[in-house]
Amino acid sequence: KNEVEQSPQNLTAQEGEFITINCSYSVGISALHWLQQHPGGGIVSLFMLSSGKKKHGRLIATINIQEKHSSLHITASHPRDSAVYICAVGTGNQFYFGTGTSLTVIP
Amino acid sequence: KAGVTQTPRYLIKTRGQQVTLSCSPISGHRSVSWYQQTPGQGLQFLFEYFSETQRNKGNFPGRFSGRQFSNSRSEMNVSTLELGDSALYLCASSLQPGYYGYTFGSGTRLTVV
């Protein structure tokens, strides 16, 4: 059983569409992270959440601690948003990762 | 401000050999954590160091070890390499443990032949 489940695995969108990526986890967490990985491997930390909602530009991340669920939203998607998005949870002792959502935004 | 620096970027080793990877954190960051990424298993947590002490360790065999120096630079060592150790090894640094405010390096891609 995976401690972190992400959906969908793959996502193709037209430029300008609103995108949602979901993450569910089964462990008690100290924080949840959304990461972005571009081809070539470099990882960028987008958000760190322990409650509520955060917004950065066109990206919005929410978390519901009671339901153990988080969502990453991208408004007005752009081809440069094409990447793998990874949900990760830290428990204080361990760090668990989702398998990632591969997003392709078509012009 | 310089980011997290990992060296080397690419490495090819033979089965049975050992390898040492290096990670220099962002200046002022005292926590360094290591991760393995493979196509089959995705990202997995290896271990975390803070103030030269290993704080946490993931579910990897003892062939995987690490250390942290007084300047916060960290090294990861894999002994008796196996083909399955071929992966992208990433490190991340943060001011302190607790998985807050992590900055990732670009990784070292290790190929075992």
Image (cartoon, coloured by chain):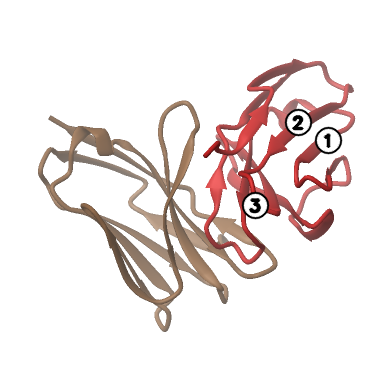
- The chain painted red is B
How far apart are labels 2 and 1 at the CA level? 6 Å
Chain ID for label 3? B
Chain ID for label 1? B
The numbered mark at residue B21 is 2
Q: Amino acid at mark 3?
A: His
Residue A78 place in picture, x, y as percent: 18, 38
Q: Are marks 2 and 1 in contact (CB under 8 Å)?
A: yes
How far apart are labels 2 and 3 at the CA level? 18 Å
Along the viewing direction, whichever of A3 and A16 lies nearer the viewer: A16
Q: Earlier in the sequence, mark 2 or mark 1?
A: 2
Q: Are marks 3 and 1 in contact (CB under 8 Å)?
A: no
Residue A1 place in picture, x, y as percent: 58, 62
Q: Which residue is mark 1?
A: B77
Q: Residue shown at 55%/73% (left/top)?
A: A29
Q: Quadrant of the C terminus of chain B?
A: top right
Please tell me in which quadrant of the rendered image residue A20 appears.
bottom left
Q: Is residue B88 visible?
A: no
Chain ID for label 2? B
Q: Colour of chain A?
A: brown
Helix, strand or loop status at disc 3: loop
Along the horizontal axis of the image, is A25 left or right of A101? right
Helix, strand or loop status at disc 1: strand
Q: Which residue is mark 3?
A: B29
Along the viewing direction, whichever of A96 and B66 lies nearer the viewer: B66
Q: From the viewer's perspective, is residue A102 above or below residue A61?
A: above
Q: Residue shown at 79%/38% (left/top)?
A: B76
Q: Earlier in the sequence, mark 2 or mark 3?
A: 2
Q: From the viewer's perspective, is residue A103 above or below residue A40?
A: below
Neighbour tally class for label 2: few under 14, some 14-19, many 20 plus, Cα within 10 Å: many
